[in-house]
Amino acid sequence: MQKLMESKGIAKAVNRKSLKKEDLIDAVMEVLNNSSYRQAITQLRELALDVPMTGLEKAIWWVEYVLRNKGAKHLRNPAADVPLYQYYLLDVIGLFMLLAGIYVTISYFVFKTIVNKIAVKLRKNLKKNVTELGTFIRNIS
């Protein structure tokens, strides 16, 4: 902002990181004593105040425009007619929740199937090992 103001000739920039009392005083005195700053700000003021109509005139014009065009429906924002569930993206959130639910359900059943297959193999191996152990013990005795 300060570079913009300095480029327009309405301010003198100072370095805030290495600011000294003398630098600040010099900058303020230059702005106060140099007439080019006053001329630049006066010119910018005139540009800002040079508008085709005042705020009140502009408000009156818009009211008359709306009355002439029977409510000016063509200027109405189409987003005003969007249902609340779409405005708050509840349909999108619902879709993502449904997809997440399907993913979790499928993952659960896949995990359950894998665990069951591993458990069946472990049970078979356990029965086989128990049988072999029993046979081994009988043979020893």
Image (tube, helix red, strand yellow):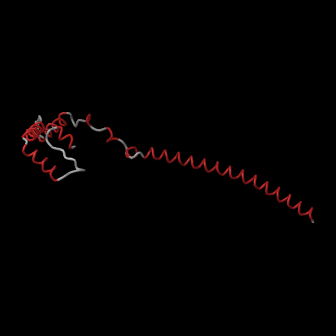
Where is residue 67? Give x, y as percent.
18, 37
Q: Closer to the camera, 109 or 19? A: 19
Q: Is residue 47 above or below residue 17?
A: above
Instruction: Report the number of numbered marks.
Output: 0
Q: Closer to the camera, 48 or 51? A: 48
Please report the residue visible at 6 percent of the width from the left and 44 percent of the height from the top.
Answer: 33
Please report the residue visible at 83 percent of the width from the left and 60 percent of the height from the top.
Answer: 130
Q: Closer to the camera, 51 or 101? A: 51
**Left or right, 113 with reference to 30:** right
Q: Quadrant of residue 37?
A: top left
**Left or right, 13 with reference to 92:** left
Please report the residue visible at 10 percent of the width from the left and 38 percent of the height from the top.
Answer: 40
Please report the residue visible at 8 percent of the width from the left and 46 percent of the height from the top.
Answer: 32
Q: Quadrant of the C terminus?
A: bottom right
Q: Quadrant of the N terminus?
A: top left
**Left or right, 120 with reference to 24:** right
Where is residue 77? Give x, y as percent.
29, 38
Q: Closer to the camera, 8 or 111? A: 8
Q: Is residue 74 above or below residue 132?
A: above
Where is residue 16? Give x, y as percent.
22, 50
Where is residue 69? Give x, y as percent.
20, 33
